[in-house]
Image (tube, rainbow, N blue to C red):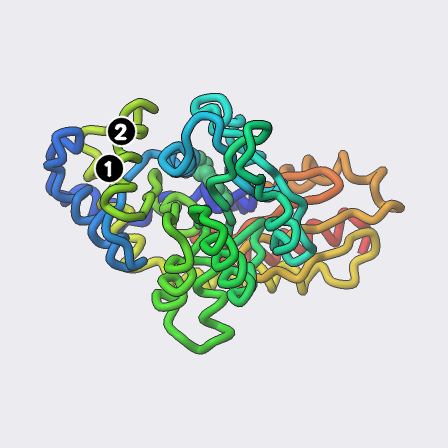
Amino acid sequence: MTPVDLRSDTVTQPTPAMRAAMAAAPLGDDVFADDPSVNALQDKIAQMLGFEAALFVPTGTQSNLCAILSHCQRGDEYIVGQMQHCYRWEGGGAAVFGSVQPQPLNHASNGSLPLADIEAAIKPDDAHFARTKLLALENTLGGKLIPFAYVQEATDLARRKGLARHLDGARLFNAAVAQAAQTGADARAEARRIAQCFDSVSVCFSKGLGAPVGSALCGSQEFIARAHRIRKMAGGGMRQAGVLAAAASHALDHHIDRLADDHALARRLADGLAGLDGVQVEPPHTNIVFVDLTAGARDKSAGLLPALAAQGIQATGLYRLRFVTHLDVDAAGVDRAVAAIRHYFGT
Ligand SMILES: *Cc1c(COP(=O)(O)O)cnc(C)c1O
């Protein structure tokens, strides 16, 4: 029985074509800046998103750290959402390594940070306060596409107030594909439109794009030069990294439009569970489906993941389960997951 791993879109294995691209990649030493495959990837993603420069980094966490520490000095602060990765899920790195204070805000139900809350959180220039320097947003956020009109308004507000603007776009291309489905435009054009609202953007290649490792941070030449120094301090200067960059390049060439398949599979999973007694399903915008167990079904929660695992189906969560679709799951796998969950709840 083929396993159905819905824990995350990070679990994908490189495809045979991606492995071939990796094997064929010309290599140098990226610390000497002469790995042609890394340089080509950096040029490609910078150009795609409309920035002067880009930096290949091992992880999205390091990319966000490099970004925050390049925008902010010790004693500065960044405005961020409670549920954003670069506040909640990165070990407090900006505070630990950079002495940069986060100012977390609560999200509205659509994932946005209310403009009035952003404005109220910007501190006056006064010795009592940390200096507010940066607004960090995330798109998609927990699989939610943040409305483009809001992205424009929030980043305009930040610009007017003199703040730098960073996008954690780990899943920017999922957002772009979902946005393109609404506007009818090309996904690359939507990715660029979103990215251009920001001074810096971080993109993960190792999530839905299906590469084994790597992220890129994009920004101005001057910003990337600062980020490059921080990457070095963080131990992120890699040598024959072109073998990884080639996988990321291949993903940009071949795996963007297919994200629509992942989104369709997420809807298939959500539709399959709709109306099931004991669960409440949030209709997914992209490739992440959250399923909440209703109060009456919570006594069944502890047994659910083991029951699924016994059938080769993996997910995460307890009362709020998370299922993520990706390159290595298909409709048959999603249907098996739906059937197993339905069976567990006795229908
Ligand atoms: C996964 C993720 C990251 C971090 O990526 P890693 O490569 O796991 O460090 C950052 N931001 C968001 C929104 C993510 O989903």
Image x and y of residue 51, in percent: 28, 54
Kindly identify the residue that appears in the image at 49 percent across and 63 percent down.
152
Left/right placement of residue 47 relative to residue 266 reads left
Please count the marks in the image. Answer: 2
Question: Badges 1 and 2: C-beta atoms under 8 Å apart?
Answer: yes
Residue 265: quadrant of the picture? bottom right
Kindly identify the residue that appears in the image at 41 percent across and 30 percent down.
73
Q: Quadrant of the C terminus?
A: bottom right
Residue that numbered label 2 is attached to: 229
Image x and y of residue 250, in percent: 26, 53
Residue 313 visible in the picture: no
Going by the numbered disc 1, the residue's amino acid type is: Ala
Q: Given the current orientation, which residue lies at the most extreme right position? A: 296
Q: Given the current orientation, which residue lies at the most extreme bottom position? A: 184
The residue carrying pointer 1 sits among few (fewer than 14), some (14 to 19) or many (20 or more) residues within 10 Å by Cα, namely some
Going by the numbered disc 2, the residue's amino acid type is: Arg
Kindly identify the residue that appears in the image at 64 percent across and 43 percent down.
105
